[in-house]
Image: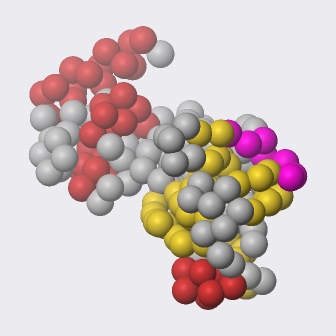
Amino acid sequence: MAMDFGGLGARSTCDGPDATGAFVLGGRGAVLQVEPFEAQYPVMIEHVRARIDSGGPGEHRGGLGIDTAMRMLSDAELVVRGDRMALAPTGRKGGDPGGRGYWRSRHPDGTTDEFAHRQSHIRLARDDVFMIGTSGGGGLGSALDRDPASVARDVVEGRVSSAHAREAYGVVVDGEGAIDGEATLQLREQMRKSR
């Protein structure tokens, strides 16, 4: 199985596509096909979901990567190979980089291990959870030029957290999508002066 790709970079007229180009079980698909994978390997897929805040901020946002978690149903040994993990996918024309991908495991006691982007002989025990995060695409243009309504829609759709909307885009928005227009204008002005 390979899941080396995630979101793509933003385009000149739109946001980058989310969760693209994963090669799973020899075929091309956007996300892991859970039932065939669980039938072939001794794992239980806990979740496959978009990686919130992984798309690079920009006037046009980079596409989101994917978070996948699979619980081992028996001891296992893994080999991982990934791209866009050591270096974040770059943004263009003032856009910020997308989120880097990762490989990690979580043990029943709550501790976690991080793995290199290329590593072999990774031993996992039954009930360990192997976690894959594919990278997000880079943004295009300044995040401070993104339409606040687009940022609010991203928050409502779970693509961007309220905290990231404030820190990266200078948009003050609650989880319901309500924008504080005055606070947004002031914050963006402060952020432009500090850059």
Q: In which image quadrant can residue 81 be found? A: bottom right
175 or 91, which is in the foreground?
Answer: 175
What x and y, as percent, mark residue 44?
54, 72
Q: Does the magenta segment cover residue 115? A: yes
Q: In the image, 108: left or right of 37?
A: left
- From the viewer's perspective, is residue 95 above or below residue 177? above
* Quadrant of the rendering where the N terminus is positioned: bottom right
Vertical placement of residue 157 versus 102, above or below: below
Q: Is residue 11 visible?
A: no
Colour pattern of the rendering: secondary structure
Determine whether, in the image, residue 183 is placed left or right of residue 18: left
Classify 26 as above or below 95: below
Q: At which x and y percent is residue 191?
A: 37, 19
Q: Does any portion of residue 192 appear in the rendered image? A: yes
Q: Residue at x 73, y 82 (%)?
A: 25
Q: Residue at x 56, y 59 (%)?
A: 127
Near-viewer residue (65 or 37): 37
Q: Is residue 3 magenta?
A: no
- In the rendered image, residue 141, in percent from the top left (x then y), is placed at 51, 40
Residue stretch in magenta: 114-121
Rendered location of residue 132, percent (x, y): 62, 56
Q: Main secondary structure of the magenta part?
A: strand
The residue at the point 29 percent across, 60 percent down is: 157
Q: Residue at x 69, y 85 (%)?
A: 40
Left or right of 159 in this view: 89:
right
